[in-house]
Amino acid sequence: MKLNALLDSAKNGFGKLRDELSEKISKWFPALSYLPRDTELVKIHGVFRSKNLLKNKDIFVAIEWKDGVTSSLPIEMASFLAPGYTFQDKKVISQSEYERQLAHIISLERVDKTSGHYHYYFKTDKGLMKFSGFELARTLFFHNPHLVRAAYTANGLSALAFVNRNQSPIEISFPESTKYPVSFIGTKSNRTHLAWMLLDGGAKKSAFSVFESFKNDAGKLGFKFVPPNLKGWQLEVSVRTDPEESFTEVVRVERIVEAVLNENPSDVLVNHPKTKDQSAKSKVETSQNGHVPADDIDPELDLGEIPGLGKRLHNERLKGFSFSCSGIRSVKSSKGKSAGNSKRAPSTEDQDIKKEKAGIGVAEKDGDAQEFSPSINQDDEITETVDLPQKFSLFAEVIDEVAKSDGVRLVQEAKCYRFPAPTNNSKVVYQTKYEDLLKYFVAILELKGSQLVLVEADTNNLRTPKGASTLILGLKEDPKANFEEILQCFSDKGAQWSHNFINERCDFFSPCRHPSLKEKGKIRTDQEYKEKWVSDLREKLRLFRKSS
């Protein structure tokens, strides 16, 4: 038999063996088209390939649940797949609590290769710690489905965006044809992570190991990802200890407190073709053709469905994780194009909304589902001027003036965040002029030993603007939980504050309406408007002094 024939025969035999192995793994870990309800994820067994489970998907994560059942989910779900998470519908509803530690990585001591899913033992200032390869990859690279797919592509990171080191600051530019959502570069934390991945040679080499090891595994179940050099990194981790073991097991990486950039310290500017300048004056108009049909903002999750081109992105953010790297000194978003005034507004009238499904994977022409996008590293403070509403600077100035009052101390300066997504079918907080969830401003003052939260919704930037007021909240015990419930209620009630709901969660509550634009028929100047706003807030604080 000729050599070429022998090689072809061996290749065919190898392919057949690989397919048989893949079929067996698929039976051990059958694919789910949904997230199991109220069942805790306890173990990630690895990653495998199968073309026979769900249409349009061929890479799956093998999972074990607390009830002993094993199954698999598409690799694009990776950001949500960590031990201790429990799901309901499209959300992580709870996380098993473990001891949290802040660990400083000193060195990699050894790699456990006894199973196909590698584990890494790092020497830290808290002793020896064991990390699973998948959990490291999840928190280093798998922050959203687009980054997951990039890691499983030969030139994924290089093709994601272009880097121009000849500019100062260094420019990272997405191509005009990019499908990477502009909302994924909306915070300093996720821009910092993007810059680290594209600027650090060790990061790019590590990301490529995801693709390379998977390609070489020939259909096996495992995860042989090689992390970058983590010496000098600081991680907040949830750990499980066993007195009979010489190491501490890391269950989850909760936060990258400090990543090391193996390059010279850099300033970075991120350019995205869909970035729009929200500081420019703009308005959204209804076209002569009428309103855009309202989207289903609570689609049914069906991971087997194929997302359609141009369909709505349903971004589900998992709160809590963030990524910091002081080697990237500043990382700003380019100003972008002026937000236009030709967009058609969704209908604000009550109407029957067509129920839709949300699938995962690459959007296709024949797809009909919304694109489900589970993501982490999405919920930090909005700091870039380009992303801040015009009114924020005035709010910040007013807070600074009020904080100069006798007996008042500024605990937290004015900051800007997004409201949480509604948990019901309410859609008003999505109907903004800046094509993002409605934003709010918040600051904290201290008066007579009590902390007061001042919060304001950016209702001027709703497509149908509403009147504004600054709420002064003296929150009851567990203020963080009470404040989050108040914000959630606002989103669920169509961008309206429920005073009864707020009163139940506050020891003191007083809304302060904004000054009128006119006084005695004369339009107030900007300075007069600001002075009146400051005066009104000081009066409300005086009432708090009298009541306490």
Image (cartoon, grey):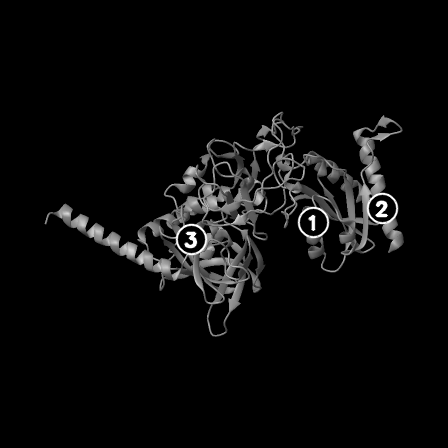
Q: From the viewer's perspective, tell me whether residue 168 is left or right of residue 348.
A: left
Quick one: 157 or 165, which is closer to the camera? Answer: 157
Earlier residue among tags 1 and 2: 1
Disc nearest the viewer among 3 and 1: 1
Residue identifier under label 3: 227
Q: Quarter of the image containing the C terminus?
A: bottom right
Q: Residue furthest bottom?
A: 244
Earlier residue among tags 3 and 2: 3
Mark 3 is surrounded, within 10 Å at the Cα level, by few (under 14), some (14 to 19) or many (20 or more) other residues, namely some
Q: In the structure shown, which secondary structural element does the residue marked by tag 3 occupy?
A: loop
Residue 464 shows in this picture? yes
* 64 over 326 or under it: above or below: below
Quick one: 302 or 130, which is closer to the camera? Answer: 302
Quick one: 464 or 445, which is closer to the camera? Answer: 464
Q: Position of residue 21 (x, y in %)?
A: 30, 58
Residue identifier under label 2: 540
Q: In the structure shown, which secondary structural element does the residue marked by tag 1 occupy?
A: helix
Q: Position of residue 216 (x, y in %)?
A: 31, 51
Residue 487, disc? 1
Residue 379, disc? none
Q: CA distance from mark 1 to mark 2?
A: 22 Å
Disc nearest the viewer among 1 and 2: 1
Earlier residue among tags 3 and 1: 3
